[in-house]
Image (spheres, grey):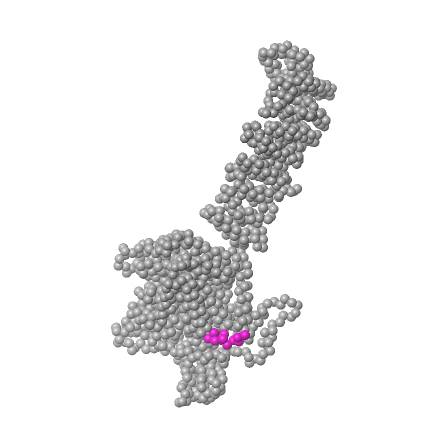
Amino acid sequence: TAGCPFHHRPSASRSRGRNYEAELQRCRPEVALVEFGDYHPLKPIMVTDTKTRHGARKGSTSSSSSSSSSVPPDPLSSMLDGTDPLSMFAAASASETPAISRSRKEKEEEAVGADFEPWSSKRGEILARFTTTEKLSINLFMGSDRGKAPSPGSSAVSEKVRTRLEELDDLEEGSQRELLNLSQQDYANRIEELNQSLKEAWASDQKVKALKIVIQCSKLLSDTSVIQFYPSKFVLITDILDTFGQLVYDRIWSMCSDPRPLPDSFTVDDVNDTAKETCLNWFFKIASIRELLPRLYVEAAILKCNRFLNKSGIQETLPRLTAMIKGIGDPLVAAYTRAYLCRVGVEVAPHLKDSLNQNFFDLLGTFRQIGGESVRKQLALQRVEAPEYLTLYSPAISWILQCIAYRAPEDYVNCAEIWVEFTCRHFTKREVNTILADIIKHMTPDRAFEDAYSQLQSVIRKILTYFHDFSVLFSMERFLPFLDMFQKDSVRVEVCRSIMEIFIKHQLDLTRDPVILNAMLHICKTMHDSVNALTLEDERRSLALLIIGFIRMVSFGRDFEQQLSFCVEARATFCNLEPVLVQLIHTVNQLAMETRRVMRGSHSRKTAAFVRACAAYSFITIPSLSSIFSRLSLYLLSGQVALANQCLSQADAFLKAAVSILPEVPRSISVEGKLRSSESFLLDFTNNFLAMLLVVPDHPEHGVLYLVRGLLNMVQDYTWEDNSDAKVRVYVSALPLLAAMGQETYVYSVPKVDSNETLYGGDPKFLSEINKLCETLIGQILDHLKVLGRDEGTRRQGALAFSLFGVLLAHGDLRNNKLSQLAVNLWNLSHKHGHCEPRVSVRTLEFVKHQAQQPDMSHLSDTVQRLTLQSRT
Amino acid sequence: MSVTLDIRLKRANKVYREGEAVAGVIVLACKEPLQHHGISLSMEGVVNLQLSSKSVGVFEAFYNSVKPIQLISSNIEVAKAGKIPGGKTEIPFEFPLHTKGNKVLYETYHGVFVNIQYSLRCDMRRSLLAKDLSRNCEFIVHCQPQKAKVAPTPVNFTITPDTLENTRERSLLPKFLIRGHLDATHCVISQPLTGEVVLENSDVPIKSIELQLVRVETCGCAEGYARDATEIQNIQIAEGDVCHGLSIPIYMVFPRLFTCPTLETTNFKVEFEVNVVIVLHDDHLITENFPLKLCRV
C-alpha cells in the first residue's frame, strides 16, 4: 500500500519511466485491496455510546462549554465515532511513514524556494533579542472561562438556566491552571511541555483536548503584560500552532492515503468524502471558538487544510482572516497576528500577494493606535519607553515585508520607490541608507535591477529632492553601491547627470569634504568614461560643463598643495574632456595667483617652488589640448601668471611655446559648427601677445627683443590668406609696442619684475635696435601699400594707410620731418580714392588740432596745416 | 467472545433529503461463528418538545400534552434467526426516506426545548445467556430547498446613547457612535452571516464586540405556549480598544445541527436572532437585536 515518494517526478533518463511501487501494487492479489468499511485486525474495537439523552440541555456551543462530554452531538466528537481516521493511519504499515514525511518536506520546499529566508532562521534571533528578567505567568482555563469573564449574553438567556449550566461546566472540567512567577526559561519550558502534551493528546486520540490546548495557548497571545517579551512569546506559542496545523493536515492527508498516498499535487477530487467531512468538521469547530484571537490563530494554523475542501478555499480565507484582524484592539497583538497569517499564507500559497499587501496596508492604517491612549497607559504601567516599544514591532513588520517582497522584485521596487520618499521626508540618512541597502539586496539577484531602472531612478530623484547636503548624502554608505546597479550606460550617465545638476544647484559653499570629493569624483568619472568617439559634441559639452561645475566647487582653502594634487588627479581622470582640462589649467593659474596674493607678492622659497610647480602643471597640460586657440590663449595666460609670480624662465617658456605653435594655426577653424576664417582670432591673439611682451624682460642668453623678433618672424612666415592685409596689420600693431619699449618709464609693469626699461636703462644700443626694427616694419608696410595701389586694392590701401597714420600720430615723434612728411603722405593716400569715412576724417583732424594745443605739441599745428580734407568730387 | 455491531452509512456526512434512500451496511464482526435470534433495523424521526423550567409552573395543566411528535417510523427484518460466520459480515440495507400522509420531514435540529432527530437502530436478539446487542446511529435530514429566492437586503444600524432603550441613566452613558450593517437578515443557512461594524467614535475604550446567536423556541398548543430564547453561540469579533473608523467584519458561520431553517408549525416554532453586543470597559452592555430568517437553498 505504500506509495513511492518519487512517483510524481518526471524521469530524467532515456529509460522507460518506472513506478515500482505501482507495479508491485498491480502484481498483488485483488484481496489485498481494502474496500470501504474495512475491517482491520489491529484496529481497536470501539463501541461509542451515541444514544441520545433526551434530557440533555445545551446552553451554548461556544468553545468553553461545547466540549463538555455530557453533550453527545458535539460536532467534533460526532466525527470521531466509528471510522476514526487516526486508527486508520495507525493501521497503515509503519514502513510508509518515513516516505510520507519525506515527500511532505519536498512539497513544502516547492511552495517557497530556498531563496526565502525561512521562519526557522528568525526564531532564534527573536528569542535572543527579546528577553526579560521580569516574572511571567501562564493562565490556562482548560474548561470554562465564564468565571473570569461573564458572557455578555446574559440578557438574552434566562438567568436560572445560565447559572445551572455554568455550575455544570465548572464541576465537570473547570480546571484552571495559573502558573505564576515564571522566569523566561521556565516559561519556554512550560510552553514546550504544552507542545508535548498536545502531541501526546493527539497521539492518544484526544482531539478535543488537543484543540483546547491550542486554543488556550493562542489566548496567551492576547496577554501583553511583560510586553518586551511579547515577540519571543509569539515565537514560542506559534510553534505549538504549527505543530497543531501539521497534525491536522497530516491526519486528513493520511485518511486519503488508501489505497495509495495522495500525490503532492492532489486536487479536491482526489479527497474522499470521509476526509472531507473530517476536515469540514474541524472548520466548523474552529468557527465556533468564542474568542477572536484563538479563532483567528487556530484557523490560520490549519489554513492549508482548505486544500482538501475546495480549490479556492485558501484564496477566500486569507482575505477574510486579514479583515478579521481589524477587530484586534491592541496594535502589537494585531501586528503579530498579521505576521502569523502572512507566515502560513506565504508557506501555503506564496503567489497570493494580495492578502500580504492588505495586511501591510491595514497595519499602516492602524499605525495611529500606537500613539493612542490605551497604548500610552499600558506603557506607563509597565514602565516601557516608547522607542523600546516600537522595536517590539520590528520582527513582525520585517517578516510581513519579507513575505511581500518574496520573488516580487517588481512589486518590491514599486513599494520601495514609495517608501523611500516617506523615509526621506520623515527620517534621517541612516534609515534611508537602510532602505538603499535593502533595495540593493533585493534587486541584485538575477540582475533584477535591469527591469527596474525607471523606479530606481525615481528613488534617486526622491532622495535628491530631500537631501541637498551632499556630505550627508554621500555619507550613506550604500549610496554609491546603489548607483552601481545602473549598469546600462545611458541610464547610468543620466543618473549621474541628475546628481550633478542638483549638486551644482544646491552646493553653495566651496568644499574639501573627502566624502563629497570621493563620491563626486566617482560620479564625474562615470560621466567622463561614458564619452567615446560616438558621443555627440553637445553631449560632451554638457557633461564637461557639469564636471567643471564640480571642480569649481572644490577648494582646500589654504592647503594649496592639496588643491594642486587634486588637479593632478582630476587631470588624469578627465583627460578626454578638453573643457575640463582648460578649467583645470585656469584653476591652477588661479591657485598660483592666490598664492601670490597670500604672500603679498613676495614668495618664500617654498611658495616659489609651489608656483613653479603650478606653471609646470599648466605647461605640460596645455599641449594635450587639440584646440589651437585654447593652447595659445592658455600659454599666454599662464605666461602672464608665471611672470606675475616672478618665474621668468617659465614665463619665457610659455611665450616661446606660444610663438612656436603659431604656424600650426589653420587658416580656418570651426566655430559653433561653422567653418570660419581664423584670421581675426589670430590678430586678436597677436595684439594681446604684443601687449604682454612689453613687460617681459629679454632673456640674458638671447639677443635683444628676442621674443618680439620671434613673433614677427613667425608672422612673416605664416601662410596668410591670399589678398589679406593681416600680416601688415600685425606690423602696424607692433609699432606701438616698440614705441612703448623705448620709453624711459614703461606704461605698465609687473611688480617685482624688472622689465627691459630697467635692464637696459635707456641704453642707446637698445633704442637703436628698436628704431631699426620700426624702420623695417614701416618699410614692409609701405611696400605692401604700394602693392595694393597696383592691384585695384585702393579701398584696403586707404584703410591701411589711415591706420598707419593713426599709429604715427599717436606714437611717432612728428617733430621729425621725415616722419611728419610720411604722416601727411599717408593721410593723403588714405583720402586719395575717397574711401575714407568723412566723419572719421573730420574727427581725427579735430583731435590733432586739439593735441596741438597741448604743451610741447605745437609742432602738430604745422602738420595739421598740411592735412586737407578731400572730397571725392 | 466478543462481537461488534455497527451501522455504517454510505454518506460520510450522513445527510439525506426526503425522497432519498438512507443506505449503508450493518457490520458484524466476531472471531467465531455467532448464533442469534434475528436482526432488525428500524428508522425513526421524532420531534421532542420540552417545557422550560420557568414555564412549568404556569402551564402545568398542559405539561403532559407536550408529547413527542413522530415524523417517520419504519422497521425491517435484516436477518432471521440463524448463525453468522466468524470474521466480518456486512449486511447492506436501504431505507427510503418517505413520510406517511401529509407529514413533513423537518430538518434535523438540536435545541434546548425543541429537538428534531432522526436515527437508525439495529437490534440483534440473542439467546437468554447472551445479552441482546443494539446499535444506534443518528443521521441528518436536510429539508427540501426552498424555492423562493430572496435577494439579500442589507440592514443598516446606528447605535448611539440616544438610540438605546431600557436605559435608566442615559445621561451617565459615555458618548459613542457605532455604525454598521448586516448584508442580510434573510440568510442562507449554509452561508455565513456577514456584515460590518464600525466604531466611529467613543469616549471610553470598548472591551469587546460580540455576535450572539440566539434560538427562540416556542412550544405550545391550544391551551397556551412557552417561548424561550437561549444562546447558541457567542462569537467575539473585536477585542480591546479597536481602532476608530475601521470597518470590522461581521462573520459568523451557522453551526450545524444547532441551527435549522426557521420553522413554524402548529405545535412549535424554532426561530433565530442575532445580537450585536458591544461591551464597554466597565462591562456595560449595548445590544442591538436582529431577527433572522434562515432558509436552505
Frontmost residue, B157 versus A256: A256
Task: Give the residue displayed 36% in from the left and 60% down from the top.
Answer: B208
Q: Which corner quadrant of the image does residue A361 belong to?
A: bottom left
Viewer-closest of A490 and B226: A490
Q: Can the viewer see residue A286?
A: no
**What residue occupies the far front of the structure in this picture?**
A605
Q: Is residue A544 above or below residue A478?
A: above
Q: Quadrant location of residue A106?
A: bottom right
- Left or right of A792, for residue A695: left
User: How many numbered discs?
Assistant: 0
Specify the quadrant that holds the C terminus of chain B.
Answer: bottom left
In the rendered view, does A150 fall on the left or right side of B37? left
Q: Magenta stretch: residue B220 in it?
A: no
> Residue A740, how many percent across, how many down?
63, 20
Position of residue A89 measured from the top left corner of the image (x, y, whole percent) = 50, 74
Q: As rendered, which of A614 and A199 lies closer to the eye?
A: A614
Q: Give the quadrant of residue A366.
A: bottom left
Quadrant of the image containing the N terminus of chain B:
bottom left
Visible in this render: residue A13?
yes
Query: Horizontal and vertical percent for residue A428?
Result: 47, 47
Given residues A470 and A670, the one toward you in this image is A470
Rendered residue at 56%/53% (across/down): A444
| Magenta stretch bounds | A84-95
Residue B10 rendering spot, x and y as whole percentages: 47, 76
For the point 61% across and 46% down, the residue is: A489
